[in-house]
Image (tube, rainbow, N blue to C red):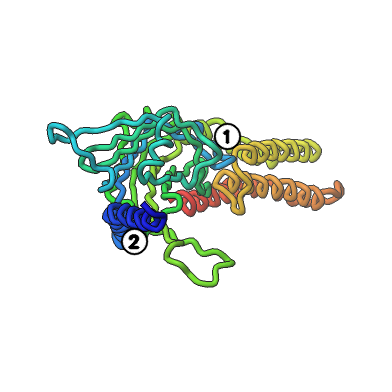
Amino acid sequence: MTKKAQKINRTINKYYVLVLLLPFLLSFSTKKNSVNKQRKTDPIEVSVKLRINKIYNINSVDETYQIDGYLIYSWFDEAAKFITEDGLVASKTYQIGRIDDLRNEMWIPTFELINVQGSGNTPNARIDVYSDGEINFEKRFFETFSSKMDFIKFPFDTQNYVISIEAFGSSSKELVFKDPKFFLDKELSRYLAEDWEFVSKKVNIKEKKYQFMDDEIESSRNVYSRVTFEVKAKRLPGYYQWQVLFPLLIIILASFAIFWIEDFGTQIGVGFTLMLTVVAFNFYSASILPKLPYNTFIEYVIIVGYIFIFLGIIAVIINHRINKDEKTTSKISLLTHFRYLFPFLYTIVMLILYMKLLR
């Protein structure tokens, strides 16, 4: 065979191979475009189930809390279907060590706990892939979360413990949450810290839009589907009632005793001593709460105590100055009126404070 004939033969073989591979290339390209088109027009719907075992280590100063629970994500993926020998639905299970390898074979979204603090602990996780295309992703977690707390009624406050979830890198055009379910233990006292009482639970889905300062054009890819689970719980105030508020009340009422004391030096000594005692309560309240731009109920009680003790000291000083001259035959005793006026005014102020903040 001549060289020219060999060259022609090799050219024919190359085209023959290309002709054989062409159907596969077209099939792969069509399949890829079909999947991309489906994900662009029809976002994958992911259902979420949350089961909480316990909410504990509630830290009012840092506004954090720890949650022990289970999360189950479920969705359908046509590419994950496989054929079984008997035609029945079967499943393949991938444990925590093989999940990363599975991401190389199929699309597995990454879910983020938005309000988590630091890195938590995921002792167990698994993915079940069913032959009909259903995928279940279940994991156990121990995480520290944070959310904005409202302490205006402290220690009679109610707080919301929240878990917010989004899909990392998958906007609402690609993935949306649907049909979330929230499970709690029937014995509610088992999953809440001892000083809290369960009030209610709720779950909602919304779209979170992220707007960045350097974005010139708003993009739909900045909109993400977010599911939020929320537990509302009421603080049991027994400890603060008997260890803080009741002693504070006794101290403020005791400060009115200066109106029954005749000696001026003793009056001043008692007044300033009780003032310093209230200061100690103020330091204590500051240690159990974050630095807030507003006053809480317990702080209002302390402020009212400051004011009445201070006014009591001023009252005895004024009374002493008026009656300082021993030669004065007609002495005016203001203390007789203050003995009843101060407790009455204090009671009125506390009732107004209670009705305004706690009702």
Identity of the residue drawn at 23% across and 39% down: 82
Identity of the residue drawn at 67% across and 46% down: 306
Dot 1 or dot 2: first in sequence order is: 2
Question: What residue does disc 2 label?
Answer: 40
Indicate the quadrant where residue 110 lies: top left
Identity of the residue drawn at 24% across and 33% down: 91
Give the camera-side residue of 9 and 62: 9
Which numbered circle lies on residue 254? Answer: none
Give the camera-side residue of 39 and 266: 39
Q: Inspect this view and state whether residue 83 appears.
A: yes
Identity of the residue drawn at 33% across and 57% down: 12
- Position of 134 with respect to 190 (left or right) is left
Label pair 1/2, CB-CB below 8 angstroms = no
Secondary structure, mark 1, is: helix
Give the camera-side residue of 11 and 37: 11
- Between marks 1 and 2 in the image, the one whose residue lies nearer the viewer: 2
Residue 206: x and y, percent?
A: 37, 57
Indicate the quadrant where residue 200 lies: top left
Q: Inspect this view and state whether residue 44 appears.
A: no
Question: What residue does disc 1 label?
Answer: 244
Secondary structure, mark 2, is: helix
Compared with residue 88, is residue 339 higher up or lower down, i.e. above or below? below
Q: Could you classify mark 1 by the number of other residues whose Cα lies within 10 Å: few (under 14), some (14-19), or many (20 or more)?
A: some
Residue 65: x and y, percent?
A: 50, 37
- Position of 220 with respect to 239 (left or right) is left
The alpha-carbon separation of the residues under discs 1 and 2 comes to 59 Å
Q: Amino acid at mark 2?
A: Lys
Indicate the quadrant where residue 213 lies: bottom right
Q: Amino acid at mark 1?
A: Val
Give the camera-side residue of 12 and 106: 12
Residue 344: x and y, percent?
A: 56, 48
Residue 182: x and y, percent?
A: 31, 41
